[in-house]
Image (cartoon, helix red, strand yellow):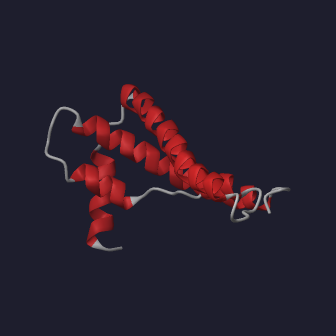
Amino acid sequence: MNILQITSLLIVLAIAFNADFLTAGALPVALALVGRLAAVAVPVLALRPCRSFSRGGIPIMTRGGLKGGISVALVLSLPDSEWKPLMLTATYVVVIFSIVVQGLTVGRLGRAPGAH
C-alpha cells in the first residue's frame, strides 16, 4: 500500500456520511450513468452505417465505465468551502457504486444472451 492509498483511506474514514449527503450522492450516480451512455451510444450509432458493432456493445461499454481515484483526487484538490464535504461524499458514492455495482456486474452482462 502506497502513501496515496493510505491517505485516501484515512480521508474516507474522516468523512461524515449523513443521510442528506448520501441522498444527494444518488443523483450524481444517475447522471454519471446517463452521461456515459450518451458518450458511448452517440458515436456508436453515428458510426453504425459504416461499421458494425456487436449487439450488446453499448450496455457493456456503459457499464464498464468505472470511476476511481482520479475523481476523488480532483475533489480533494478543491479549496475548502461549504460545498466540499457534499461534493466529496457524492464523489465517493459514485466511485463506490461504480466499483461495487458496475464492476461486479459487467461480467454477467457480457455473458448474457445476445450480448455478442
**Residue found at x 58% / y 49%:** 42
Q: Which one is nearer the viewer's eye here, 113 or 94? A: 113
Residue 105, position as x, y percentages in the image? 67, 54
The residue shown at (45%, 51%) is 95
Q: Is residue 55 above or below residue 32?
A: below
Rendered image quadrant of residue 56 = bottom right
The answer to whether residue 13 is above or below residue 23 is below
Lateral position of residue 4 relative to residue 36, left or right: left
Q: What is the quadrant of the N terminus in the image?
A: bottom left
- Name the foreground residue: 106 vs 23: 106
Instruction: Please state the horizontal and vertical placement of residue 30, each as a whole percent of the image.
Output: 52, 37
Image side of residue 64 versus residue 93, left or right? right
Residue 102 falls left or right of residue 109: left
Percent x, y for residue 15? Answer: 30, 42
- State the residue at coordinates (26%, 61%): 7
Count every numbered label the image shows and give the total.
0
Report the front residue among 78 and 114: 114
